[in-house]
Image: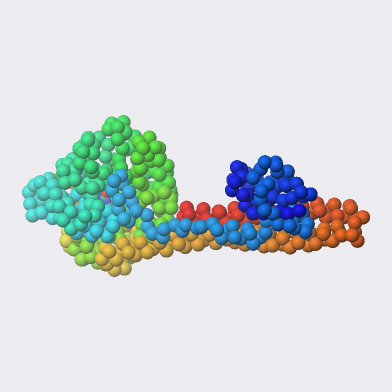
Amino acid sequence: MGYHHGPHPRNVRDFSTYVYSRVFTIDGKVYHDGISARNRQILAAQPVAPCSSLQGLSTKPIKEFIMTEFTYEYFLSLIKSIKIKLPKFEMPKLKIQDLTARLPIVQGGMGVGISLSGLASAVAESGGIGLIAANGIGLTEADYFKDGRAANIRALRREIREARARTDGIIGVNIMVALNDFHELLDTAIEERVDLIVIGAGLPIKNIPVEKIRENNVKIAPIVSTERAANLSFKMWKRIYNDVPDAVIVEGPEAGGHLGVPEDEIESPAYKLEKVIPEVVESIHAFEKECNKEIPVIAAGGIFTGNDIYKIMNLGARAVQMGTRFVATDECDADPKFKEAYVSARQEDIGIIKSPVGLPGRAIVNGFLKKAATEKQPFKCPWRCLAGCQADDANYCISIALNNARKGRLERGFAFVGTNAYRVEKVVPVSALMGVLETGYVKALFADMRVKAADVIERVKALKEEYRIAEKRLGELKAEYEYSLSEKFRNMREGSASLRQEYKKTAARLAELRLKLTEQIFETYAIIMNG
Ligand SMILES: Cc1cc2nc3c(=O)[nH]c(=O)nc-3n(C[C@H](O)[C@H](O)[C@H](O)COP(=O)(O)O)c2cc1C
């Protein structure tokens, strides 16, 4: 009698159906048995046909025919041979059609001169996407009060060109639908062939020059606060233009600036970013399939650390848009006093205001805002820049107030902020901030992986222990069985039969445990691979 054991020989056609098999001879006849990969059953010994290639295998002599020869050591060597390809411990890139940003971080457009070419180009140069905000951009020009429209267009063109001159990175523009010169600004951004146009404060549905946008290879993304808004704008685009936007930004109620969430719903769980992101991801997935294009969902509002980025991306977001943290950078285009207001802000200083535009907004509630809540701050409306502005009833002009703040005159203006502005400790270079966010993300990824892997490793350990006990029992049974077969106990047929049965059961249990162990190892592998 002899045997061959190990993985089923490669020249056997149904090799893949066995996780283990062996070939052995009894009284000169060749048999094989094994463990099926499909239903994990032990397949009973079967004679091997005389013409089979298994006949030719060399076999080793053994003392006694036993149920299995698939040893634990052999099993371990199998496990060791599994090559684990670890995931990349780095932030994933952001792809918006043919645009690829090295980092999935978009610097949110911040109006009235907070994000101009300085900030946008620094972010783009560091691997993210930098956005120049178009609203109130003309306030950086001397003639804004004479001709606001012309000043806006001139300033937007200039800032795009300056940003382009400073970096080859990805530069976009943020334009609010609510602006009275929305279409002129949109045309300017397209003519300047910016990489991306982000449209906020209203849904960009009607009269969008989609053909011109495509001709100039410009990408476009709306900002929404709900799945309903995302779905509606994509559906309408499909119907009107037979096209859909290239990305969508979901801004939650913790964001800085004007909010798309009604004032009395800001605290509602229904609008929480963590709830809305998976809803939008699912909804947009249908358009991805229908239009056969990838449409990244980008999360905004209250994202402060690399860990925050990791968490929201785990919910399906492909990138984040951040505003507050980019204000506290050297390259932010606002006056240092504006940035200092962020550094010194306490949590209790941050509140919700009713903007003259008719939307709620989050800001540092300073002396100016407190006064303006009850007293009119005299102003002359320059040119009705915002469509929904109730300038006649308003206590102040929001564009002038924001422009004063940008220039550091906070006694005559105020700063918009996100909920986390009180956590800003100092003003840093953009490259340093990007580095901190990247490191934070990788740390979070690593910690998460360790937790997931540790859980599976614990289960593997428990199974291994169970295996060892079963293996020991099998050894004992084998010895007893062999002993019972010896001369001395030749007549004790019954005892030997029941021993053989128990031995069989234990051997089967052992095989089952091995398979479970293998499954657990593969589970760990899958978790690590899929992040
Ligand atoms: C000072 C400031 C000005 C902003 N201005 C605009 C704007 O003009 N248009 C816009 O769509 N979003 C604006 N936002 C929102 C940002 O683009 C971004 O989505 C938001 O700040 C993200 O939230 P976070 O500040 O918590 O990171 C502004 C935010 C801040 C803090």
Q: Position of residue 485 (x, y in %)?
A: 86, 57
Answer with left or right where residue 217 lies relative to residue 266: left
Q: Nearer the viewer, residue 530 or 17?
A: 17
Q: Image check: 73 left or right of 153?
A: right
Pick the residue in front: 261 or 449. Answer: 449
State how many labels appear. Answer: 0
Q: Position of residue 161 (x, y in %)?
A: 15, 52
Q: Where's residue 113, x and y in %?
A: 18, 56
- Res 257 visible: no
Between residues 84 and 292, which one lies in front from this camera angle?
84
Query: Up-down: is 371 above or below 188?
Result: below
Furthest toward the top, the residue is 239
Decide: is 17 above or below 468: above
Give the residue displayed 77% in from the left and 59% down from the top.
Answer: 63
Q: How is the image coloured?
A: rainbow
Viewer-proximal residue among 248 and 389? 248
**Residue positioned 20% across, 57% down in the render:** 167
Residue visible at 70% across and 41% down in the picture: 49
Percent position of residue 90, x then y: 38, 59
Side (left or right) of 505 relative to 209? right
Residue 168 in the figure: left or right of residue 239: left
